[in-house]
Amino acid sequence: MTYEKGPKLSGARLENADFSHARLHAPDFEGVKVTDGWFYGADISGDLEGLRLNGVEVGPLVVAELERRSPERRKLRAPDPPGLADGWAMIEAMWETTVSRARQLPEAKLFERVDDEWSFVETLRHLVMATDSWLRRMVKGMAHPYHPWGLAGSWLVDPRAWGLDPEASPSLEDLLALRRERMNEVGETISAVSAVELDRVCVPPDAPGHPAREHTVRECLHVILVEEWEHHGYAVRDLGILEEVS
């Protein structure tokens, strides 16, 4: 497969472009309008907020189907402190089981990518970054929340501006220790949060980072729960493949 980095097509009009069997990683389709598209056999994952297909908003339908398949997923958008605590306990238990499973593999396997997706270790590094963004930067208001080992997507062209180290290569044990610290921070925040606090609007600091707009505490915690759930699913999927070939 040929890899090409970052063509700039913002504002362009493409006629009869052939993307058959292509793979697009982290594309930005914000505000894109596709007409007369052919999506036979296409497999799309990502943030579907506001996406309309043949005039129908897709996101709510996808969420409803995912929750039908996994009813416990509803805990990710719990509206109150007890529900959030229950959701976080579920996340903790899932990751405890999966980390124990991962440890059964040779450590080198946990640094391997499957189908060019993030490795198990890279997934954990990304979750550190996600926690730093949505808990430390937003809920706690820290101007410099990022640990250097955090990992963002390829859309972040200058990770050093955030305080991330793109050359970092932490060991599994050191990373798991950092990950434990961050998960403890989330758990402590959820344990202490009140119903009134959940409605507080968090204003991002005037420093490089994400997000760049206001969100309530509840919204920030929901993002953390969803990030944990989704990336856990990817990790379990890839562990299954690594176990087959080890």
Image (cartoon, helix red, strand yellow):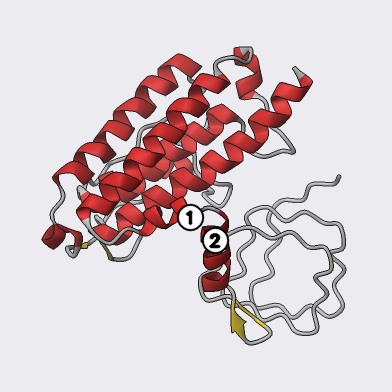
Near mark 2 (Cα within 10 A), the count class, few <14, some 14-19 or many ≥20, is: few
Q: Position of residue 29 (x, y in %)?
A: 62, 69
Q: Is residue 9 left or right of residue 139?
A: right
**Secondary element at tag 1:** helix
The x, y position of residue 17, in whole percent, is: 85, 72
Crowd class of label 1 (few under 14; some 14 to 19; many from 20; radius 10 Å): few
Residue beneath disc 1:
71
Q: Nearer the viewer, residue 111 or 154?
A: 111
Dividing the picture into quadrants, the one containing residue 53 is bottom right
Disc 2 target residue: 68
Left or right? Give the position of 169 relative to 203. Answer: right
The type of residue carrying mark 2 is: Arg
Q: Residue at x 71, y 34 (%)?
A: 114
Residue 212 in sight in this render: yes
Residue 36 place in picture, x, y as percent: 80, 84
Q: Are marks 1 and 2 in contact (CB under 8 Å)?
A: yes
Could you tell me the amino acid type at mark 1?
Pro
Specify the label residue 130 is tagged with: none
Drawn side of residue 74 relative to residue 192, left or right? right
* Residue nearer the viewer, 76 or 162: 76
Q: Secondary structure at mark 2?
A: helix
Please tell me which residue lies in front, 83 or 26: 83
**Going 48% across and 39% down the picture, which residue do you hit?**
126
* Residue visible at 87% across and 68% down in the picture: 18
**Label 1, label 2: how many angstroms apart (C-alpha)?**
6 Å
The quadrant the N terminus occupies is: top right
154 over 112 or under it: above or below? below
